[in-house]
Image: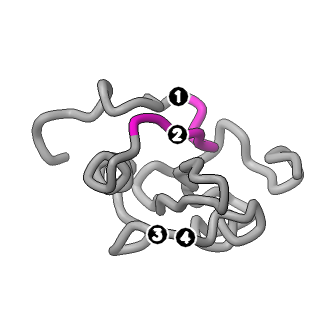
Amino acid sequence: MALAAFGGIGMADTRFCTAGRNQHGNWFIACKDARVGSSALLDQLGYHHDRSDPQDGHYDAAARHIRDTGGLFWTTNATDEYVTIAGIPNSER
């Protein structure tokens, strides 16, 4: 399923993001955009497992969730953000 079908590429709000994993073990950080919320986007894309909590948190918190559960990289609809654990800031935003 194409990410573009769910709108807002490049328009993602990184203040409202949720991480999720699909059945293949791949991670995705979905951030709210003008058309859909983060959880709804994860549902539509098939990322139903191991969601970050709280949902709709900051991008950095979703990335830390992935790191804390053993993930190393992910994809996202927030096109200007980092996509590996090497990009996770040391301090909270």
> Is 75 in the magenta?
yes
In the picture provided, is 52 more to the left or to the right than 27? left
Residue type at the position of mark 3: Arg
Outermost residue, left side: 91
Q: Residues within 10 Å of mark 2 (few under 14, many from 20)?
A: some
Instruction: Name the one closer to the observer, 41 or 16.
Output: 41
Residue type at the position of mark 2: Trp
- How far apart are the two marked residues, 1 and 2, measured between alpha carbons? 13 Å
Give the x, y percent position of residue 50: 46, 68
Residue where numbered disc 1 is placed: 80
- How far apart are the two marked residues, 1 and 3, measured between alpha carbons? 22 Å
In the picture provided, is 1 more to the left or to the right than 45? right
- Part of the protein shown in magenta: 72-79
Give the x, y percent position of residue 30: 57, 55
Residue type at the position of mark 1: Asp
Q: Secondary structure at mark 2?
A: loop
| Above/below status of 41 relative to 70 | below
Going from N to C along the chain, the mark reached first, 1 or 3, is: 3
Q: Nearer the viewer, mark 4 or mark 1?
A: 4
- Dots 4 and 1: beta carbons under 8 Å? no
**Which residue occupies 66% across, 62% down?**
23
Residue where numbered disc 3 is placed: 51
Residue where numbered disc 4 is placed: 49
Q: Secondary structure at mark 1?
A: loop
- Dots 3 and 4: beta carbons under 8 Å? yes
- How far apart are the two marked residues, 2 and 4, measured between alpha carbons? 14 Å
- How far apart are the two marked residues, 2 and 3, measured between alpha carbons? 13 Å
Residue where numbered disc 2 is placed: 74
